[in-house]
């Protein structure tokens, strides 16, 4: 749908992923006029989407307000507990009842989330689809340009915004699995030096007996794993778990692939600036973290939630300020930059700590992990930060 000539929008949202669509939908619900500069190449994936998202309480609250969560819940599974194992006896466990919450997170189908958001935007008032940005410039007049284009954002580059990317030398290998025993809502993670392996409880294709796999491994190892026949990959996976935690495999059961394998390079990245006069960055366009804590999309949706709150509050208390007012946007930056940097530091520190093969450090990190397990207030604080992103 083309914009009427001369029309000026409150916000132009650029991007086609979950963060961009959530922002456009949220702005529309709050009465802002939105030009959605959807990527020209946007289309439904032609191959199976094996990605899963770990959604925390804040993300679910936002999706509930956007009226997406009730439908998405049919494509999600709750996490009631999480078991983390080090590479030399270290262990750490979290449970929903200890946190006094119904669940720690929900593992959701990434493709289903994006389909539901796209469907909702078809009927959203005040949202008009416009052409893609060119050289960082919106195709229609707007007060604010919200860039949600992901980690390889062309618009961020065109604006001259630095993006300090530090490759990990690892790839994330993802797949869907079916187990011979029920998962009971327990997520499991093993720090195996140098790789990190996680099984996320899921309900598709087998209810109560499926997992989403996220396996962070060095690039060369990822190439080998993704080229293996299904039976050989399954054997490698089951052997990796048995070698890391012999007591876990009888509880998990035998794991079988139920999807294709996918992989992508992993990096730590942060934009040099998040906002300026008339523009703002959200999601992976502003920051990128290691997936070992499952917080990537949660951080992006927290960006959306915060920006919406800042714009709505300003419209009520300072109606003379337009959405692109730089002073207004700095409020968003102040609220989001520190939590995001803190999460990035935690995930980066954990990865490097467990990637070091030196004996003394290996013993120390596992002792430290077990010490956190015994410190109830610290455990409670860590999970609270993850629930809120």
Image: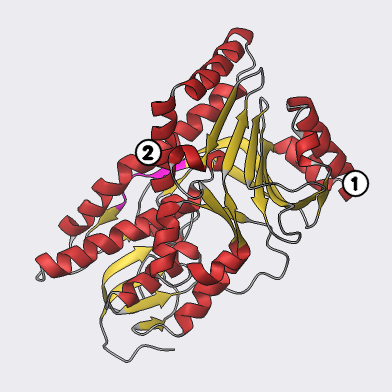
For mark 2, give the secondary structure.
Answer: helix
Looking at the image, which residue sits at the far bottom?
4
Q: Is residue 285 in view from this perspective?
A: no
Which residue is pictured at 51% across the width and 70% down the height?
70
Which residue is pictured at 72% across the width and 59% down the height?
207
Question: At which x and y percent is residue 366?
Answer: 58, 18
Looking at the image, which residue sits at the far top?
360
Which residue is pictured at 70% across the width and 50% down the height?
211
Question: At which x and y percent is residue 122?
Answer: 47, 83
Residue 138: say if magenta.
no
Q: Residue tagged by mark 2?
A: 341
Which residue is pictured at 53% across the width and 38% down the height?
95
Q: Is residue 11 above or below residue 387?
A: below
Q: Earlier in the sequence, mark 2 or mark 1?
A: 1
**Can you tell which of label 2 and label 1 is closer to the viewer?**
1
Camera-nearest residue between 377 and 256: 377
Q: Residue tagged by mark 1?
A: 231
For mark 1, give the secondary structure.
Answer: helix
Q: Is residue 161 above or below residue 82?
A: below
Q: Is residue 264 above or below residue 329?
A: above
Camera-nearest residue between 5 and 286: 286
Camera-nearest residue between 255 and 222: 255
Q: Quadrant of the N terminus?
A: bottom left
| 93 relative position to 248: left or right | left
Q: Which residues are magenta?
A: 269-274
Decide: few, some or many residues near mark 1? Use Cα within 10 Å; few <14, some 14-19, many ≥20. few
Question: At which x and y percent is residue 94?
Answer: 53, 35
Question: At which x and y percent is residue 143?
Answer: 23, 72
Camera-nearest residue between 356 and 101: 101
Q: Is residue 63 in view from this perspective?
A: yes
């Amino acid at each position: 749908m083309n914009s009427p000539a001369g029309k000026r929008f409150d916000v132009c949202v650029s991007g086609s992923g979950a963060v961009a669509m959530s922002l456009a939908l949220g702005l529309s619900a709050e009465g802002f006029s939105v030009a959605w500069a959807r990527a020209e190449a946007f289309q439904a994936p032609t191959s199976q989407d094996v990605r899963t998202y770990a959604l925390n309480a804040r993300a679910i609250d936002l999706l509930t307000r956007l009226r997406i969560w009730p439908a998405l819940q049919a494509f999600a599974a709750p996490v009631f507990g999480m078991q983390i194992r080090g590479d030399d006896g270290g262990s750490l466990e979290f449970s929903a009842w200890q946190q006094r919450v119904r669940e720690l997170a929900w593992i959701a189908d990434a493709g289903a989330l994006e389909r539901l958001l796209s469907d909702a935007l078809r009927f959203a008032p005040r949202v008009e689809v416009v052409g893609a940005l060119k050289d960082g410039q919106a195709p229609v007049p707007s007060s604010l340009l919200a860039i949600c284009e992901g980690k390889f954002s062309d618009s961020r580059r065109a604006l001259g915004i630095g993006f300090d990317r530090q490759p990990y030398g690892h790839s994330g290998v993802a797949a869907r699995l079916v187990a011979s025993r029920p998962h009971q809502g327990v997520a499991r993670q093993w720090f195996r030096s140098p790789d990190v392996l996680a099984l996320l409880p899921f309900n598709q294709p087998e209810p109560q007996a499926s997992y989403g796999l996220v396996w962070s491994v060095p690039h060369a190892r990822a190439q080998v794993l993704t080229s293996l026949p299904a039976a050989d990959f399954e054997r490698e996976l089951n052997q990796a778990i048995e070698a890391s935690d012999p007591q876990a495999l009888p509880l998990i059961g035998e794991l079988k692939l139920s999807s294709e394998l996918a992989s992508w390079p992993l990096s730590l990245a942060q934009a040099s600036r998040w906002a300026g006069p008339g523009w703002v960055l959200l999601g992976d366009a502003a920051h990128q973290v290691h997936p070992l804590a499952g917080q990537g999309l949660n951080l992006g949706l927290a960006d959306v939630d915060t920006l919406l709150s800042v714009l709505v509050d300003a419209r009520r208390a300072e109606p003379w300020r337009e959405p692109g007012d730089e002073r207004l946007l700095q409020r968003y930056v102040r609220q989001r930059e520190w939590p995001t940097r803190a999460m990035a530091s935690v995930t980066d520190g954990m990865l490097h700590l467990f990637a070091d093969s030196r004996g003394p450090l290996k013993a120390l990190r596992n002792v430290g992990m077990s010490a956190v397990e015994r410190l109830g207030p610290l455990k409670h604080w860590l999970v609270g930060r993850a629930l809120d992103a």
